[in-house]
Image (cartoon, rainbow, N blue to C red):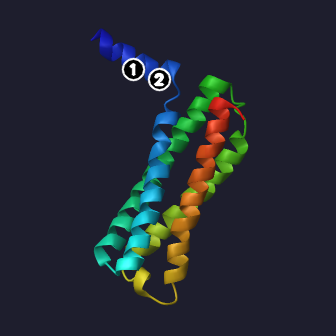
Amino acid sequence: MNLIQSIFHAITQVHPPHTLITHFPIALTGAGLFFILLAIWRGNKILEQVAFADLSLAVVSIVVCAIFGIRDNIVFYSGGAPNHVAKIILASVLFVITAITAIARWKDKELFYSKSTKALYIASYFVSFAIASVLGFLGGIILFGM
């Protein structure tokens, strides 16, 4: 039981948990982009569905990541972490883009195959991954400095 308490203490009090969770939105938006590119290349419906699933999971992980990011900013940086305002704004934009894309795709299963929406749908994967990457970089500045 001591080991479990030590691990829990380390995760919640010593090491900011946001840094662990932040890898999920980055990985899921990256995987979504990878699979949407494979779906374009191969013309495979299953690969597009995997990309959609990745993006849908990214939406949930962004919320969890944001909650822990705000918590860690308060607990570890007294509300003054470098770039915290920019990160909150970018995370909000990332959430809105991924949520709108996932909801639109959920409502219209042929979104990827429609000529009028395909380019915007694919672009949202690129934008989501780009924003998640920038957020990761800004987080690295908080932990490691410039």
Q: Are marks 2 and 1 in contact (CB under 8 Å)?
A: yes
**Can you see residue 64?**
no
Q: Please provide percent x and percent y for residue 24.
A: 44, 47
- The answer to whether 85 appears left or right of 117 in the picture is right
Within 10 Å of the Cα at label 1, are there few (<14), some (14-19), or many (20+) other Cα atoms? Answer: few
Within 10 Å of the Cα at label 2, are there few (<14), some (14-19), or many (20+) other Cα atoms? Answer: few
Question: In the rendered structure, which amino acid carries the disc numbered 2?
Answer: Thr
From this view, report whether residue 119 is shown above or below residue 96: below
Q: Please provide percent x and percent y for residue 112.
A: 42, 80
Q: Which residue lies most toward the bottom here?
A: 115
From this view, report whether residue 38 is shown above or below residue 90: below
In the picture of the structure, the residue carrying the numbered disc 2 is 12
Q: Which residue lies most toward the front here?
A: 41
- The answer to whether 32 appears left or right of 142 in the picture is left
Q: The C terminus lies in which quarter of the figure?
A: top right
Q: Nearer the viewer, residue 37 or 74?
A: 37
